[in-house]
Amino acid sequence: QVQLQESGPGLVKPSQTLSLTCTVSGGSISSGGYYWSWIRQHPGKGLEWIGYIYYSGSTYYNPSLKSRVTISVDTSKNQFSLKLSSVTAADTAVYYCATWEVSSGAFDYWGQGTLVTVSS
Amino acid sequence: DIVMTQSPDSLAVSLGERATINCKSSQSVLYSSNNKNYLAWYQQKPGQPPKLLIYWASTRESGVPDRFSGSGSGTDFTLTISSLQAEDVAVYYCQQYYSTPLFTFGPGTKVDIK
């Protein structure tokens, strides 16, 4: 069973770049059939899809964040990463990595999530 | 963008009773070519990530108890918990993937015990 674990700073200053990594275990990021995703949840609010990447490197981003988001993959480390630039307090959220499965069309595996606070 | 709405915002149901959550999409999420509704349901308990319950609007994920069922087509969908258990207290979200890769979630419905 695939397991996901987010890691990265819990505090980022305004205007800086938020960087998170998701480490995948229990399966290979190169196996295909999955898109490796980032989703965030503002405190007490709903879920917002940020973007995803295929193991080949193809990426798709939410248009509302596209100008600030970069998702990359490191197949040798079985990891994928999120960078969100020029952050503001509005980017304070719990960030989840998750798998989007092609056959079901749904997000079937999730990391535990990591809270990132944007504050000086 | 496809906008998802849910009703009610919250509900309280007695143990063993039925809970019904509604989800509506701003446009149809039914793909005519394969007759599938591109809709999923998730359960999120406090301090936990969402858990996939239902996909293709009515297909239960492996390991999900059969008291959870999904129904509906086009723009109107329902998640039913046939006999509410204490462990079902959570927020439930619907999500469309018709406009893949632009996924959108509903605002959530909180389910509590009466």
Image (cartoon, rainbow, N blue to C red):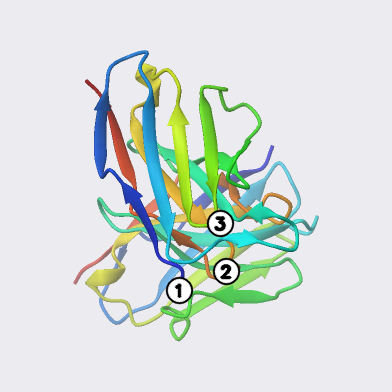
Which label sits in the foreground, 3 or 1?
1
Disc 3/disc 1 C-alpha distance (Å): 28 Å
The residue indicated by pointer 2 is B99
* Image mark 3: chain: A
Task: Give the x, y percent position of residue B106.
Answer: 39, 55
Q: Residue furthest bottom?
A: A67
Q: Quarter of the image containing the N terminus of chain B?
A: bottom left
Q: How many neighbours does mark 1 have within 10 angstroms: few (below 14), some (14-19), or many (20 or more)?
A: few
The residue indicated by pointer 3 is A22
Q: Is residue B98 left or right of residue B42?
A: right
The residue indicated by pointer 1 is B1
* Image mark 2: chain: B
Q: Amino acid at mark 3?
A: Cys
Task: Give the x, y percent position of residue B12.
Answer: 24, 27
Relative to residue B34, is residue A83 depicted above or below? below
Q: Residue furthest top?
A: B16
Mark 1 or mark 2: which comes first in sequence?
1
Q: Decide: marks 1, 2 in contact (CB < 8 A)?
A: yes
Tell me, yes or no, whether dots 3 and 1 are on the same chain.
no
Task: Give the x, y percent position of residue B29.
Answer: 56, 61
- In this view of the protein, can residue B45 be seen by the observer? no
Q: Quadrant of residue A41?
A: bottom left
Identify the residue shown where x is 46% and y is 37%.
Answer: B79
Identify the residue shown where x is 41% and y is 54%.
Answer: B24
Relative to residue B11, is residue B83 depicted above or below? above
Disc 2/disc 3 C-alpha distance (Å): 25 Å
Q: Amino acid at mark 1?
A: Asp
Which label sits in the foreground, 2 or 3?
2
